[in-house]
Amino acid sequence: MRHLITTKDLEVDEILELFEDAKEFLDEKARTLLSKKSVTTIFFENSTRTLSSFESAARRLGASVLRLDVSRSSSSKGETLFDTAANLDAMSPDAIVIRHSNSGVPHILAKHIHCPILNGGDGKHAHPTQALLDLFTIFTHFKGKVKDKHILIIGDIKNSRVASSNIELLTRFGLNITLVAPPHFMPKSPLNKAYKLDEKLIKSADIIMNLRTQTERHNKSIYASLKDYANDFCLNLRLLDKHKVIILHPGPVNRNIDISDEVLNDNRSFVLKQVKNGVAIRMAVLKKLILER
Ligand code: NCD
């Protein structure tokens, strides 16, 4: 049985197969591939896109969805996790999608549960389906020719699980990554780094990925205000000019802090395409993990 805890759980050829399936699923037709299967979602941290995307994906494949409401749980974390694992297992789901603010929780749960675990984001650690949908978006746009494409990853990279999953995955597919961030948001990394966002850097990019400032993961306020951060790193039309590039953001976007309103409305912004692709990718992943058990 397979789990999807990090992008490393999948080989390159398996990812290419997922992309083939996802391409078909973009027709948004309902399927019966997972009829009689049940998918449990359990999100200990807020989510807009990922939860609804996984649930739509499961339903579009004909599976039933059980959402566990844990938002008001008051038990201590250790107890909650242990009890949760036992209770979940007793319901015999065919897959569990979990999000948690602590890194490593999906990995721990996987040891106690007898069905595939899909990580919907754990702390700062990993968000594998987000990276898969980002790569799928890049891959379809460039018709598979992604090797040596230059991507800027801009923002709070150090605290972002989206960034760490993308760095692992995009490196494996041969993309050339530059991390763009102020020093306190820059992780330790052998990748190219830039501490300033300017026109020259943007002109060198084929893809720009902006990330949200993860204020909930900061122990203290680092920038005096998000406005100060925006002055230096917000992607706006002046910086972008007429440069041909695709712009990605996993959402939720802090408008005019990460990306300006004008850029979000520009046809170079692929943010909503990512959301659409996300459902198709999650269908492909659910199909693979549940049917290959
Ligand atoms: C991200 C997440 O929750 O990790 N959003 C998402 O899943 N689409 C990014 C974020 O919260 O900034």
Image: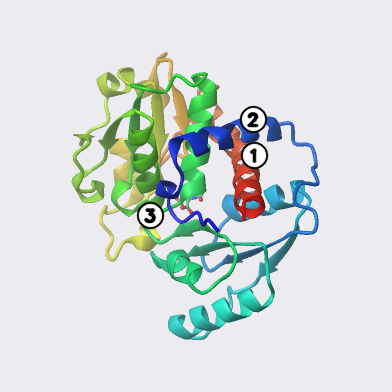
Residue type at mark 1: give it. Answer: Ala
Q: Circle 2 is placed at which residue position?
A: 23
Q: Position of residue 272 (x, y in %)?
A: 59, 35
Q: Quadrant of the N terminus?
A: bottom right
Badge 3 residue CB within 8 Å of ligand 1: yes
Q: Mark 3–mark 2 contact, CB under 8 Å?
A: no
Q: Mark 1–mark 3 contact, CB under 8 Å?
A: no
**Label 1 neighbour load within 10 Å: few <14, some 14-19, many 20+:** many
Q: Circle 1 is placed at which residue position?
A: 280
Pair 3/2: label in front = 2
Q: Tag 3 or tag 1, which sits nearer the N-term? A: 3
**Label 3 neighbour load within 10 Å: few <14, some 14-19, many 20+:** some
Q: Position of residue 90 (x, y in %)?
A: 66, 78
Nearest the camera: 132 or 101? 132
Q: Circle 3 is placed at which residue position?
A: 214
Type of colouring = rainbow
The answer to whether residue 244 is above or below residue 288 is above
Tag 1's secondary structure? helix
Q: Position of residue 74 (x, y in %)?
A: 53, 84
Q: Name the quadrant containing residue 168.
A: top left
Nearest the camera: 147 or 160? 147
Residue type at mark 3: give it. Answer: Gln
Tag 3's secondary structure? loop
Residue at image position (60%, 40%) is 281
Q: Name the quadrant containing residue 42.
A: bottom right
